[in-house]
Image: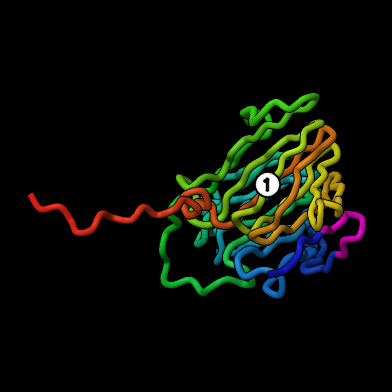
Amino acid sequence: MTEALYFKSDDMVFAQTQSDASGSARFCQLVGPEISKTIDAGVAIYDGCSIECRVNYDETAVVLGGTFRILTGENYSRGIEANFGDVIWLTRGTRLKYQGDKAKVFYARHPGGTGSALIGEEKPATDVYHFRSTDMIYSQMQIYSGGYASTCSLVTPEISKSLGATIATFNGSSVDWTTEYDQISVALGGVMRIRTGKNYSHAMDARLGDVVWLPKGTPLKYEGERGIMFFVPYPVDWRLRSQPVRPKPWPPSVR
C-alpha cells in the first residue's frame, strides 16, 4: 500500500501539451499508475485553447480559478461554463471539447493511467453534470465543542459507477476516520488539516490548490480552520461494499 502523499500547489510543475496562436494547455499529473491502480489525478490549465476528444474515463473536476468550459452534445451545441468552486462530472465515452480562459482545474479520473480502450460508439450512460457552487446545499455532520463540520454530496452511486465527489467543511473540529476507499482531494479554502501516521503526528496543512492522496486503510484525523476541501473517493459505493454480508440461513426453509 502506498502512503499518504501531500502535493503543495506552489511546487507543482506543469508540462505544455498544446501551444499555438490560439492558446495553450498545460498539465501536472500528480497521481498515476505508479501510485494508484484506481485513480488518475492532477491539475490542468486551459487558456484560449480548444481540445477535442472522446474520453475513455469517468472524470470529476473542480475549478480552482479562471473560467472553464466544456462543449458537448450534437455539433458541440451544449456549452457548460464553470467558475471557481464549480464541479463537473462526465462519463466515459463522452465527446467534448475542453476550453478555458486562464482556467485552473483539478481533475480525477477512473480508470487510472490512460484507461481502457472504448469499444464501438456506445453512448454514455449519463450526461455531463454541472454542479454550481452557488447551488450547493451542505448538511451538518456533527457539532463538536467549539467546532463545526458539514458535507455536500455531489457525485453519488445514482450518477456514477466509479468515482464519487463530495465537498466538506471543517472549522475547529476534529474527526477520527479510517479511509475505506482510495481518495484524492484538493483544498478550496482556509486551512484543511489532515493528520496521519503514528499518534497522528504527521500533519498536512492544505491550502487552496494543495492536493492530498490517501490510500485505502489510512487512519487519520480531519481538522480545519475554515477549511473547505473537495474529496474524490473510489469506489463511489464504498459504504455498501463495507457492509458485512449477512449469511443466508441453512438449511433453507421448506414451505
Instruction: Tell me the quadrant of the picture where the N terminus can be found.
Output: bottom right
Residue at point 46%, 50% (across, down):
243
Residue at point 65%, 35% (across, down):
151
In the structure shown, which secondary structural element does the residue marked by tag 1 occupy? strand
Q: Position of residue 229 (x, y in %)?
A: 74, 42
Q: Do we see residue 141 in this rendering? A: yes
Would you say residue 148 sits in the magenta stretch?
no
Residue at point 83%, 68% (across, down):
15
Q: Residue furthest right?
A: 10
Q: Residue furthest left?
A: 255
Which scheme is used to colour this image of the protein? rainbow
Would you say residue 7 sits in the magenta stretch?
yes
| Quarter of image, res 23 | bottom right
Q: Position of residue 223 (x, y in %)?
A: 79, 40
Q: Bounds of the magenta span?
A: 6-13
**Horizontal side, residue 73 vs residue 61: left or right:** left
Q: Position of residue 121 (x, y in %)?
A: 42, 67
Q: Residue furthest front?
A: 251
Say above or below: 72 vs 119: above
Three-letter code for the amino acid on which mark 1 is drawn: Trp
Asked whether 63 or 192 is in front, the reply is 192
Q: Do we see residue 135 in this rendering? A: no
Which residue position is annotated with label 1? 177
Q: Position of residue 198 (x, y in %)?
A: 81, 57
